[in-house]
Image (tube, rainbow, N blue to C red):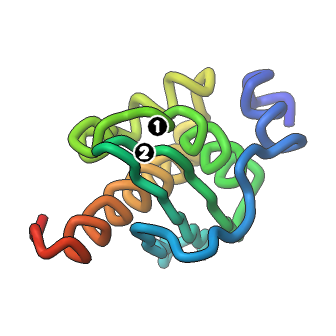
Amino acid sequence: MGQYSPLVIEHFEHPRNAGVMEDPDGEATVANPVCGDRMRVMIRVRDGRVAEVRWQTRGCPPAIATSSFASELVQGWTLDEVEALTRERIAEGIGGLPPDKIHCSVLAADALRAAVRDYRSRLGRGT
């Protein structure tokens, strides 16, 4: 794992917020058909902000690390801020990823945005 930043290694070895959330306000599952990585994310929303995130990821170490990192990153953010989250912000925030592992940050960003869309659709607000 020498090609990864200390923060990637830390989040892989000690992932935060992993697990299942009972009765989430929004949830989504996304997958990368090329590599097979899959992420399920669940969010709890309070006063228009992400109050809690839980996730389950099956994939390579950077997929697990970026899931953990992103789950911490967005706590307290507004829903609009989460919808604007980019893979670049995740990749840069975690100390960079090798070019062949950038898809891991895409998975986390896509899953979080999809969970917000699910939350909004449950409220009848659309996307």
Which residue is tagged 2?
Answer: 50
x%, y% of residue 93?
A: 53, 23
Left or right relative to 93: residue 16: right
Q: x and y percent of residue 56 in the render? A: 67, 67
Alpha carbon of mark 1 to alpha carbon of mark 2: how far? 7 Å
Instruction: Name the residue type under label 2.
Output: Val
Q: Secondary structure at mark 1?
A: loop
> Which amino acid does the dot numbered 1 rest on?
Val
User: Vertical placement of 83 versus 117: above or below?
Assistant: above
**Which numbered disc flags the more N-terminal residue, 1 or 2?**
2
- Quarter of the C terminus within the rendering: bottom left
**In which quadrant will I find the N terminus?**
top right
Residue 15 in picture, x, y percent from top left: 79, 45
Position of residue 6 relative to residue 99, above or below, is: above
Q: Is residue 19 left or right of residue 85?
A: right
SS assignment at label 2: strand
Q: Is 10 or 82 nearer to us in this picture?
A: 82
Residue at left offset 22%, top offset 65%: 120
Number of other residues with Cα within 10 Å of mark 2, as a class: few under 14, some 14 to 19, many 20 or more: many
The reply to whether discs 1 and 2 touch (Cβ–Cβ < 8 Å) is yes
In the drawing, what numbered circle is on residue 74? 1
Tell me which residue sits at (27%, 35%) in the image.
81
